[in-house]
Structure formats: C-alpha cells, structure tokens
Amino acid sequence: MSAETVATRIWLLLVGLTLLSAALADGAAPGVLTALVALAVVGIKGALVIRHFMGLDGRFPRLRRLMNGYIVLVPALLFVLGSVLAR
C-alpha cells in the first residue's frame, strides 16, 4: 500500500472520529461515559496525527514519548478537573 493511500485512509479515519465526537456532543446526555468516550476519541486522534502526520513513528523516540505522554496527561487532567468542578 502506498504512503499516499495510508495517509488518505488515516485522514478519513480522523474525519470519521471528528464526526463521531460531533454527534456525541450533539445528542448524548452529559455524563461520565460520554466524557470518557470523547476523551478517548481525542487520544486516538492525537496518536494518529503523531504517528502518521508528524513523522514520529520510528524516528525521534524522545519526542514521540513526550507527545504520547501529553496525549495521555491532558485528557486525564481534563477528566479530573471536569469531575471536580462539576460537583
């Protein structure tokens, strides 16, 4: 499979995930499960962008680990802050 085909498929997956999160935001009742699904979508999209469009799949292991940590840490902090402030 060519690099262009892979990039197109990843881009289409990102578009699909964006539409999923928009539909989720529009129709779902607020709650823990909705928040977790939305944060999971953010993490998946971030990981796809880092791996396929930033070129960090095999090169620059330190930067890749830093970005992956960011993808895990920021949604986790958002979830904790949202849980605390919602009370």
Image (cartoon, rainbow, N blue to C red):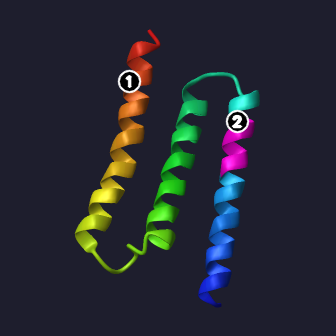
Picture coordinates of residue 35, whole percent (x, y)? 55, 32
Picture coordinates of residue 8, whole percent (x, y)? 68, 74
Above-or-below relation of 85 to 55 = above
Residue at (70, 65) in percent of width and height: 12
Residue at (67, 62) in percent of width and height: 13
Which of the 4 quarters of the picture holds residue 28?
top right
Position of residue 86 in the picture relative to residue 26 (left or right) = left
Residue at (61, 32) in percent of width and height: 34
The residue lying furthest to the bottom in this view is 1
- How many marks the image carries: the answer is 2
Task: Name the main secondary structure of what is drawn in magenta.
Answer: helix
Q: Which mark is residue 24?
A: 2
Q: Quadrant of the N terminus?
A: bottom right
- 23 falls in the magenta region: yes
Q: Which residues are magenta?
A: 18-24
Q: Which element type, helix, strand or loop, lies under badge 1?
A: helix
Q: Amino acid at mark 2?
A: Leu
Foreground residue among 63 and 20: 63
**Which residue is labeled 1 in the image?**
81
Above-or-below relation of 86 to 42 = above
Q: Which element type, helix, strand or loop, lies under badge 2?
A: helix
